[in-house]
Image: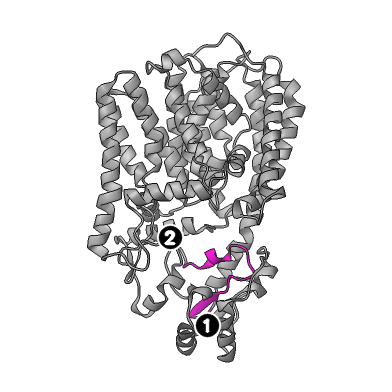
Amino acid sequence: MTSDRSIDPARLFLGAAIGLTLWVGASFLWHVTYAKGVSLPVTLFLDQDFPVLLVGVLALALLAPLTQGEGPGVPPPTARIVVPIILLLGLSAWAGHYILFQDYAISRDEEVARFAAAYLREGMIARPIPPEWVPYRRAIMPEFFSPFGAQAYWTAAYLPVNSAIQAVFWRLGDPNMAGAALLVAGLAALWRAALRLFPDRPDAVWVVLLLGFTSTQLWVTAMTPYAMTGHFALNMIWLALVLRGGWAGHLGAAVVALAAAGLHQWHFPPIFIAPFILWMLLGRRWGAAAFHIFVLAAIVIVWARLWPGLLLHELGPPADVRPSAGVADKVGSLFGRLGGKWQPLVNITRLIAWNNLLLLPLALLGIAAIDWRAAVRGRAIALPLAMGVIAGCGLALAQGYGWGYRYAHGFIGPLCLLAGYGWLRMRRTSLRPVVIASAIAVLTTGLLVWRTYEFVAPYARGHRMIQASTADVVLVDPRGGLFVTDLVRGQDGVPGRPIVMNLGMLTLGQIDALCETYAVALFDRTEFRPIGVPLARWHYGATDALRRRMDRLRCGDRPVPATP
């Protein structure tokens, strides 16, 4: 990959500032000015991304002149320097779960992953529903449950590998170490891949590493139970093994691919791997290409056929909802979401805001610099890197919660490597521009961490209040509170006392039975405002009839502690 035209770093900064301004402006117009209603991604965009990008764009413009001139020499990216930095990032991510997220997983996705980790730790593939709670099973587990045996078992809808990794670390002492360990593994693999791709350019290796080290998205997501840290780590390990080559490298990559496909949804790794198979075919590496095509087939067989078959055999036929693990279901769901939930502006804006602001500009330069003659002969690995990134970012489906754009999380490593190729087009090899951009990233990370803490704090406090209740049952009335349905959960992934239910998913008969048999507490909008939960509009409906019945029965008056 060569280019006769080099890029001035000051122009890169100014061009990035202008491009980001236009992109953020378009996002604001589309999703805020002319939008109907405000979704969760737009709420997070306004609270986190928009103000952070305003600061970042201003910093890029003001600091552009400082990118000129030579900087300090570049030390070789040796293990003595790189490994301590990676370990420090891992340790800080582990601590961040307790400090930033207050030992709370805010989304239902994360809670379901931890729920599955709890029963896997106990040697089960599902949690039997206690007989007395079977009639209330959907109010206790409102969504993201597997349909197999759903009349007698609670089982996560997601595949088990992410939860199994958490279960292993739970056995070792703390499941929240899993994300930190995966972050360390992923960054180490990114470093090894960069060394192989840029063996004579330590400055390019450092660019790749600095962009990875200053990714707020990688760091903050590693504080959570999300499967996306696993996707980043295993994608990078897969790539490092393939670049190593030989039968051991490809066989190891196959094992990694099978594990990655079982993290939570099996279709993520094939999107990453397929462009590399094309790269192998273009380079006439027929054996390697055929082997990895076989691996993709094995992924579908294992996770779309055998795993659902195991659940069917062990737990029983689907109940309550239709199964959704088959190939046809997955493809149909994907195209259905593309039709109704494709939101490239706001989602890519979150990706930009939660990463180093030079990540995408340098990656675009790397894509533009591809030598297409070499690419069509399978000699330019930037081609499969770019194809994967375009696919991962182009499928910009609505994600709900996410610190950055989590559906592109597995492609942050390829973006960093493409940025390394983009760096080769810069006029000088001094790291001054990337160091300045990394300083800006530290500033924006601080702002994002602050806004994230403020966003999570009310829900973490609400969860602690519910768990501190002396009632047998706590009914969460979600009307009037933003996203409070996710407070319906157990403690550390295990339903216990109190049993927490979504009031709106009960019937009048169930209310009568609960109020007659158990001590019941309510958690509703009277608690939302004092603890800082954002208020939301609500409409009269069936839940009002449930509340009136509870009032007549004088049920639900047991207080939820205000200071857990």
Query: Where is residue 290 drawn, in percent x and y?
Result: 25, 28
User: How far apart are the two marked residues, 1 and 2, measured between alpha carbons?
Assistant: 26 Å
Query: In the picture, residue 272 is in which quadrant?
Result: top left
Give the overall secondary structure of the magenta segment: loop
Q: In the rendered picture of this protein, how many numbered marks are placed on residues?
A: 2
Q: Is residue 81 visible?
A: no
Give the amino acid at mark 2: Phe
Work out whether mark 1 precedes mark 2 in sequence or the reverse, and give the earlier one.
2
| Residue in view at x 47 percent, y 55 percent | 110
The single residue placed furthest to the left in the displayed view is 313
The x, y position of residue 307, in whole percent, is 28, 53
The residue at which mark 1 appears reads as: 520
Reply yes or no: does residue 34 show up in magenta: no
| Start-end of magenta stretch | 470-490
Q: Mark 1: which secondary structure? A: strand
Question: Label 2 belongs to which residue?
Answer: 144
